Image (spheres, helix red, strand yellow):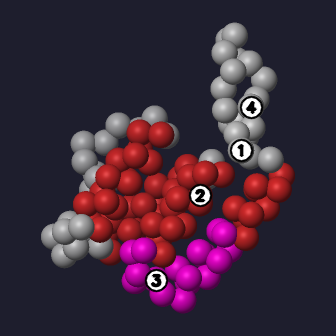
Amino acid sequence: MVIWAKPHLGKWQPWRHLCEICQGYFTVGIHTAWYLVRDHPDDARNHASLRILYGYIGRKEDAIRESRRAVELGPESTDAVNGVQRACDLALVYARNGRDRSGPHAH
């Protein structure tokens, strides 16, 4: 189901702000992912999951931090499949937040 927002500049756009119910689900997801990161801090998958949730609720700096950490823990040199995906995810986080970086490892 797609929820439509008020028109912006004469165009209908998909809902940009999550409804309160959805925010509640994301909050529960963030707490769950945060506990996974706390209990398993060296698992890049947990940082990547937390990054996704932070990104959805607009916590940009947190999303960038978790994405960087996921890349550090699972770089392309040690994980050819998932490492590439994490580097692409970091680039996407930068792009969605208006940041221009020379590469996934640039700080």
Residue matched to label 4: 4
Of residues 90 and 101, the one nearer the viewer is 90
Which is more N-terminal, label 3 or label 1?
A: 1
Which is more N-terminal, label 2 or label 3?
A: 3
Q: Is residue 40 left or right of residue 80?
A: right
Of residues 48 and 97, the one nearer the viewer is 48
Circle 2 SS class:
helix
Residue matched to label 2: 54
The Cα–Cα distance between marks 1 and 3, rounded to whole angstroms, is 36 Å
Q: Residue furthest right?
A: 20
Q: Does the residue at mark 1 contact the one at mark 4 (Cβ under 8 Å)?
A: no
Residue matched to label 3: 41
The Cα–Cα distance between marks 2 and 1, rounded to whole angstroms, is 22 Å
Q: Residues within 10 Å of mark 3 (few under 14, many from 20)?
A: some
Residue 1 - label? 1
Q: Does the residue at mark 1 contact the one at mark 3 (Cβ under 8 Å)?
A: no
Amino acid found under the numbered disc labelled 2:
Tyr
Q: Nearer the viewer, mark 1 or mark 3?
A: 1
Return the x and y of residue 79 as percentages of the image width and height.
Answer: 22, 73
Name the image quarter holding the N terminus: top right
